[in-house]
């Protein structure tokens, strides 16, 4: 199975002479230690050397081999992609992977997950094609993740 690419952030301006730069990354990933994760930028693989919080809602990222302001300046305003190979490893506090991995796929019983979004930092909602007028909170009350499969808890959904 090939791993699909998913946009998770946008690189910003350089932060230091040591190769750090700002990244505007999806809220889900802000609390993870992304060291040694491979990300894709313009079709090229980059390995994260360091990833850390900076000030209120900002993160800094440093890639292996990018140790100067000149090198990282070339990456400014580039979209950062993650592959599905990490969906079993990067789980939130409720043991759920990033919902973005499952948009436009089928979850249990063939339901189509058609949309996801965060209206409050860290709180995600999604819609299923079969219930398109109903927003479902993405949390352990309504979803579970087991052996690489995302499942909807119907008992909670219809009650």
Image: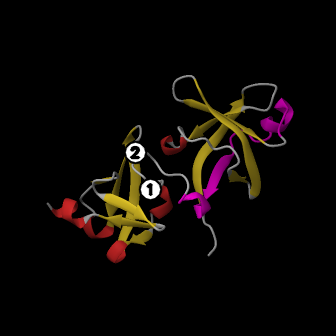
Q: Is disc 2 surrounded by few (<14), some (14 to 19) or many (20+) residues within 10 Å?
A: some
Q: Assess whether residue 130 is covered by the magenta stretch.
A: no
Image point 54% across, 59% down: which residue? Answer: 87
Compared with 133, 20 (above or below) is above
From the viewer's perspective, is 133 left or right of 3?
left
Residue closest to the eye, 73 or 33: 33
Q: Quadrant of the N terminus?
A: bottom right
Q: Quadrant of residue 78?
A: top right
Dot 1: element: helix
Image point 34% across, 51% down: which residue? Answer: 139
Q: Quadrant of residue 82?
A: bottom right
Residue 40: give x, y in percent of width and height.
70, 54
The magenta span reads 66-88
Q: Which residue is mark 2?
A: 118
Residue 57: give x, y in percent of width and height.
52, 29
Q: How many marks?
A: 2
Residue 107: give x, y in percent of width and height.
38, 70
Q: Quadrant of the C terminus?
A: bottom left
Compared with 107, 87 (above or below) is above
Q: Which residue is mark 1?
A: 99
Dot 2: element: strand
Q: Is disc 1 surrounded by few (<14), some (14 to 19) or many (20+) residues within 10 Å?
A: some
Of all residues, the one furthest to the top in this rendering is: 55
From the viewer's perspective, is 153 left or right of 40?
left
């Amino acid at each position: 199975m090939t791993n699909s690419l998913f946009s998770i952030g946008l690189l910003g301006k350089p932060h230091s002479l040591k190769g750090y730069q700002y990244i505007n990354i999806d809220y889900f990933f802000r609390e993870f230690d992304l060291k040694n994760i491979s990300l894709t930028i313009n079709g090229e693989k980059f390995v994260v050397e360091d990833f850390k919080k900076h000030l209120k809602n900002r993160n800094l990222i440093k890639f292996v081999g990018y140790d100067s302001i000149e090198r990282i300046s070339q990456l400014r305003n580039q979209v950062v992609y993650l592959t599905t190979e990490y969906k079993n490893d990067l789980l939130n506090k409720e043991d759920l992977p990033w919902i973005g991995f499952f948009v436009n796929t089928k979850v249990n019983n063939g339901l189509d997950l058609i949309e996801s979004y965060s209206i409050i930092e860290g709180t995600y909602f999604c819609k299923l094609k079969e219930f398109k007028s109903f927003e479902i909170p993405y949390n352990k009350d309504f979803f579970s993740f087991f052996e690489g499969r995302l499942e909807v808890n119907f008992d909670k959904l219809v009650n």
